[in-house]
Image (cartoon, helix red, strand yellow):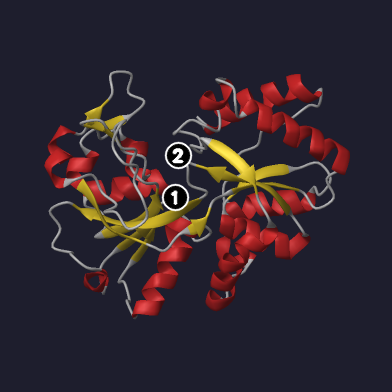
Amino acid sequence: MITTGGEIMAGALEDATGLEFEVSVPTSYAATIEEMCASPTDTMGFIPGLGYALASQLCGVDVAFKAIRFGFDVYWAQVIVARDSDIQTLADLNGKKWGYGDVGSTSGYMAPAAVFKALGITPGEAVQTGGHPQSVQAVYNGEVDFATTFFSPPLKPEGEPAWKIGDAPDIPDDLIDTCALSDDKTKLLCSGWRVLDARVNIREAAPDVVQKVRILEITPPIPNDTLSFGPDFPAELRAKIEEALVAYAKTDGWEESIGSTDFYGWTGLSPAKDEEYDIIRQMVEAAGLTLENLK
C-alpha cells in the first residue's frame, strides 16, 4: 500500500511540477537516512521525528512539513496489552516480554524507552517485530506481553466533543463489544467512534483487535513525522514541490496516498521548523543513539 500510495502521490506531483519522481521504500529508517544523505540534491522523504533528528545532525537533511492527523500536529506512543492481561500499570511491565517494531521508531521504541528509563522500569526479553502492525499482531497472538506502537486519538462521532489531551486514550469500555469493520473495510468503528491508533492496521486480519487488545498508557506528546528534503536540494525546485504538496493536500487524491490510514494517515500538513525536534534530539542524546544503532 505504501508503494502504491507513493506512486499516486508521485504522479500528482509530476503533473503539478513537470518534474519526475522515483518512489523508493527503504527497508529501515537507517536506510532512509543513508539514502537521503547519499543523494543530497535530489531526495525528499517521509521520515519520523527520530529519523529527522539524526538525519539533520548527520548531513543537514532539512524539514519542510509535519503531519497533521485529525487536527493534531503531535502524536504519542502507546503501550498495548491483551485486554484480559493482568498488567494494569506501567510498573507491571518489569520483566515482561516487550515487542517493538524498529529501534529507529520514535513511537515504537524511543519514546517508550525514555519513559521506562525515567520510571525505573526494566522490561524482560525484547522482540523486534518489524513494524507497528506486527507489534499489534504479536500482542493479539499472545507472542509478547506488551508492545509499543504509535497512538492517534480516536475520532468521536459528529456532534460529540473532540478527544483532547487528558482524555482516556482507548474506546470507552461500554462500546468495546460494538467495534467492527466498516462495510468497505477501510475503518474500524465502535458505535460511531473511529479507531485511529496502530490497532487499525490489522483490522482486516483481526477485526476483533479492539476486543482483544487494549491501550495501557500513552506517552507525553511527540512532534509529528516529517516531510524533509536532502541538504542540498535546489531551493527553486523545493519551493515548487512544496507549493504542489499544499495544493495536493486539498484533493481527493491525497486520501488515496499519504492520507490513507494504510499509508501514513496524514489528514493534512503544516510548515515545520527544525527547532521543534529539539525534544527528540534530547532523547537521542540521553540514550546515546546513533545511526549504527538503527541498523
Q: Nearer the viewer, residue 175 or 44?
A: 175
Report, in whole angstroms, how far the alpha carbon at label 1 lies from the one at label 2: 26 Å
Looking at the rendered structure, which numbered label has been put on residue 43? none
Residue at 77% over, 59% down: 60
Local packing at callout 2 (Cα closer than 10 Å; few below 14, some 14-19, many 20+) is some
The x and y percentages for residue 147 are: 32, 57
Local packing at callout 1 (Cα closer than 10 Å; few below 14, some 14-19, many 20+) is some
* Whether residue 237 is visible: yes
Residue at 62% over, 43% down: 270
Does 174 sit left or right of 34 as displayed? left
Q: Quadrant of residue 273?
A: bottom right
User: What residue is pinned by disc 2?
Assistant: 70
The x and y percentages for residue 5 are: 56, 28
User: What residue is pinned by disc 1?
Assistant: 130
Q: Nearer the viewer, mark 1 or mark 2?
A: 2
Residue at 15% over, 58% down: 85
Q: Is residue 158 above or below residue 39?
A: above
Q: Nearer the viewer, residue 157 or 42?
A: 157
The x and y percentages for residue 269 are: 59, 40
What is the count of numbered marks? Answer: 2
The secondary structure type at the circle numbered 1 is loop
Q: Is residue 93 above or below residue 131?
A: below
Does 267 sit left or right of 93 as displayed? right
The x and y percentages for residue 111 are: 45, 64
- The kind of residue on which mark 2 rests is Phe
Q: Quadrant of the C terminus?
A: bottom right
Q: Which tag, 1 or 2, sits closer to the chain's start?
A: 2
Q: Quadrant of residue 280?
A: bottom right
* Whether residue 105 is visible: no
